[in-house]
Amino acid sequence: MRLTGRRFILINAVLFILLIGAVVLSSLLGPGEIDLAQALYGSSKMDIDRLFTLSLAANAHRQILFTVRLPRIILALVVGGSLAAAGVAFQALLRNPLAEPYILGVSSGAAFGAILALSLSLEISFLGYYPVAAASFIGAAGAMFLVYFVARVRGRLPRHTLLLVGVVVNAFFGALIMFITSVVDFTRLQSIIFWLMGSLQAVRISWGVIGLVLLFSLLGISVLGAMARSFNLLSLGDEPAAQLGIEVERTKKIALLVASFITAIGVSVSGPIGFVGLIVPHIMRLLVGPDHRLLLPASVIAGALFLLAADTFVRTFCYSHFGTEIPVGVVTAMCGGPFFLFLLKRGQKKAFFD
Amino acid sequence: MNMVELKEVSFAYDGSLVIDGLSLEVKQGEFLGVIGPNGSGKTTLLRLISRVIRPSRGEVLLSGQPIRRLSQREVARLVAVVPQETLLYFPFTAREIVLMGRSPHLGPFEIEGPGDLETCEEAMALTDTFHLADRFLVELSGGEKRRVIIARALAQKPRILLLDECGTFLDIRHKLEIFEIVKRLNVEQGLTVISVEHDLNMAGRYAQRLLLIHQGRSFALGSPQEVLTVANIQEVFKAIVSVGEEERTGAPQIFPMGLSKTS
């Protein structure tokens, strides 16, 4: 179906409304019951003149909402949206249906950094960020630049070389991670394994840092959004894309760096949450079509929605049934896969072709 | 005025010379056929003209301007290419593919407008692909796919059309249709056409001038009658043919006879 302005607005509006609904619902759910009116306005009695005056006085409801739930909700949205956007970009860039944000080594680089920090109990401060997250981001950035410079051949980024180098870098960091986990002492092992599963739970970062994460992620997502038409043309092949006016090598480089960057941010905040970056783009492609000008924004919203739903599920249902929160990466893996299979069976023609 | 010009252009790929000191002038409104054996550099020539690769030596000029001073977009507004093969991994419909031909004329956030849709519909009508508009490209036959890609090239509204063996996979009717469309655009709208062809008879029938490339060099350049000679074909293709003349059009027609004894 051809993309029209009307279809673009309609689909994104629907998704956005669902997202707002999910945010409101999620902020109400949790171990402590809160009253939204109390949290925002300081009183459960609502009348019209109160609607626009937010009370500044502290109360228990506000405390829960703003220091416990809202940061986590925002991060779930940011990480989910970033991973989905990066997934779309990598699938377009590599023209490979199995491409996802972690394919080029970013997550294993991040994991190495984080695990190193966890095992050494490092004390580094990186712009006020926390040691593990900072080390993880450095590891991710390191892996990204490694892949970029090794895969670059005569100023170009050939697709197959990129994939191969990514696999090698993943293997390399994977080996280092295995080494550390084999020599580290038992007490640290648990936190390492927990980090590796991907979770938004241990996140207790300040609002300032949340702001930074939000800012840079949105910036990165916007850059990818601006490249949507280029992604459409890239799917025809490097040469036809160039013949239709795209600066192919420049586009590939920017896409690689920006997508890796937002993935790195996401992974350093929450550990490697899997499947969001692989499945959300596929599902959205089946639902709204392959035109990236619609696919990208729709996937970002859907990814945010998906991770928020998964994380809310983890901290409400799982918490009350298992007594402990299971990492959200477990949930995304368990429900993402089967749902995707279901959609694939239904819309067999509209998936990827070989 | 020269629409396309090559000045002593050489291109080497990984050390081996593919194009060797080639000079060429193609006037506006000309229909040039490019023929030569496999590996002689024909596709490389088209790549040089569409700025996909840069010459190692020499200069390429489009409409008088050096190609290295033009952006990829500017070149795409002048030159449209119909490549040899099309691979596609995403489920785009034929209409969406043809619409992509409008990209060089649109801003990064612009969605195709009614004028663009009209251009595409015209292009699809010309190539008899309108009835395929809502089908997925990957489902179409080789010939249908080729015609959709040609429609995409026409939708670009180029001044120069480059065809890379566009007759492959097409039955005689569709082959003729494509050449007739291209010839008509060439004659009526002054579209400059450079067509790489394996089918020597089609090349001889439709092109005004032929360039015979041999080992990256210009072996012969002239009218079809001048270029398609028994001697030329024997030397370059190592094939023995007999050349006749078609009664009404005077176009040289090649009759394959056998292999040349020399290696």
Image: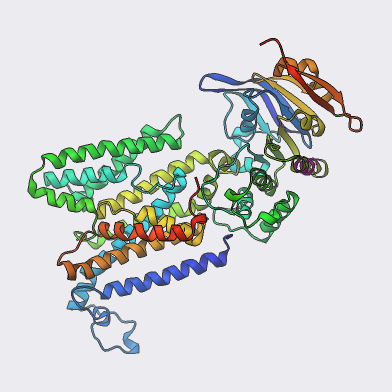
Q: Position of residue B3 (x, y in %)?
A: 73, 34
In the foreground, A94 or B109: A94
Q: Position of residue A296 (x, y in %)?
A: 46, 57
Whether residue A256 is visible to the viewer of this picture, yes or no, is yes
Q: Quadrant of residue B197?
A: top right
In the image, is residue A259 part of the stretch drawn in magenta? no
At x 35% / y 38%, what residue is drawn?
Answer: A166
Q: Position of residue B92 (x, y in %)?
A: 56, 53
Whether residue A297 is visible to the viewer of this picture, yes or no, is no
Q: Is residue A56 left or right of residue B233?
A: left
Q: Is residue A118 above or below residue A41?
A: above
Q: Quadrant of the C terminus of chain B?
A: top right
Q: Position of residue B130 (x, y in %)?
A: 70, 55
Q: Is residue B131 above or below residue B34?
A: below
Q: How many marks?
A: 0
Q: Is residue B14 left or right of residue A20?
A: right
Which secondary structure class fits the magenta region best?
helix
Q: Quadrant of the N terminus of chain B?
A: top right
In the image, is residue B180 part of the stretch drawn in magenta? yes
Residue stretch rendered in magenta on the structure: B177-183
At x 73% / y 40%, what residue is drawn?
Answer: B171
In the foreground, B219 or A39: B219
